[in-house]
Amino acid sequence: MSAITAVVLAAFVAYVTAFFVGAVEGNFALLLMSATAITGVYWLAEKFFFLPRRRSEARRLQLAHHERALALEKQGFAAPGADDLAHAEHKLLMQPWWLDWTAGLFPVILAVFVLRSFLFEPFKIPSGSMIPTLRVGDLILVNKFHYGLRLPVFNTKLMANNEPQRGDVMVFRYPPQPSLDYIKRVIGVPGDEVAYLNKKLSINGQTVSRVNQPDFFDGEQMRYTQQFGEMLDQRRYSTLNDENRAAYVSPIADFPFRDNCRYPAEGVVCKVPAGHYFMMGDNRDNSLDSRFWGFVPEANIVGKAFFVWMNFGDLGRIGSFE
């Protein structure tokens, strides 16, 4: 059993290492669920088979020690010391390494699995598409139950909760490549007509209010960008516009419900189909979003982002951005 466990652990460590260095494109949710299931099997085997067997052997050892002590006393010899018995019992009851690294880790892995799958999941912001709301390097928390409980890996909704609202910052599985997680702002909900023309947003024919703000300074690119305060359904947030970028939008490929969108020279107009959402980044001219690849199906929703819990380059980023 120890040899089999060693092979399983070695394969698991190799896969996790390859996953985190980017050598393989894996599914972390599936990896965590598999680890929970495998360690759970070992935990059950330990609880109902291996531990009872070790305890039975310890009881036999105690009985043998007692019988030997009686036999020695009858012959006039001193009984063996209790310390030797206690040491032998300890060695018999001690978990072998292969159970310690499987069954012993099960409660921790299970807790992480439940927390990450149903409550909160951490993400790291890898790009600048959500600047100024979120910066590169922000470590954020995503509320996994805000939009309803979903079955891990399969993403099947188990229980409904809130519906996504315009202005929410949402994490979702990227429709062209569902193994990737994207984060954008919800701009259009089912039934909305979203127009982004000449870099101005309107929903169902109503222009979204925006006001000029001081230009945003990008420390990495060492330049200033136009910044606006936007209000969508009483939700206030800031957006960026690059005045040197054209308003024209070109879809990167065909996508489901492509006929719901028009692409004039001024930008894009889309009618959001039922069960789908139109997403945009706050960094409007540096965001690959629904303008280019279409709508996000309800089944792709991961959760609502709400809190920056760490940014190692700027501790002042910690806090809520809602």
Image: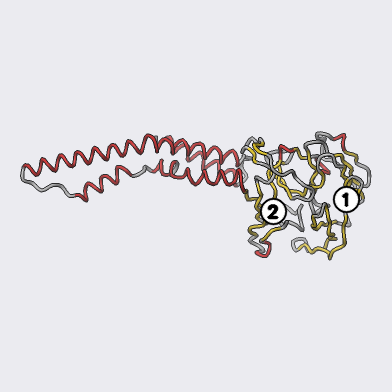
User: In this view of the protein, which residue sits in the foreground, 310 or 186?
Assistant: 186
Question: Does residue 302 appear left or right of residue 10 in this picture?
Answer: right
Q: Residues within 10 Å of mark 1 (few under 14, many from 20)?
A: many
User: In this view of the protein, which residue sits in the foreground, 162 or 40?
Assistant: 162
- Residue at 75 percent across and 57 percent down: it is 133
Tell me the SS state at disc 2.
strand
User: In this view of the protein, which residue sits in the foreground, 221 or 251?
Assistant: 251
Question: Does residue 230 appear left or right of residue 136 in this picture?
Answer: right
Spatial CA distance of label 2 from label 1 is 23 Å
Q: Residues within 10 Å of mark 2 (few under 14, many from 20)?
A: some
Marking on residue 213: none
In the rendered view, would you say 71 is above or below 245? above
- Where is the C terminus found, in terms of image quarters? bottom right
Circle 2 residue? 306
Tell me the SS state at disc 1.
strand
- Residue 67 point in image, percent of width and height: 15, 39
Query: Could you tell which of marks 2 and 1 lies nearer the N-terminus?
Result: 1
Q: Amino acid at mark 1?
A: Leu
Circle 1 residue? 201
Quarter of image, res 66: top left
Quarter of image, res 177: top right
Question: Does residue 15 appear left or right of residue 128 in this picture?
Answer: left
In the rendered view, would you say 154 is above or below 247? above
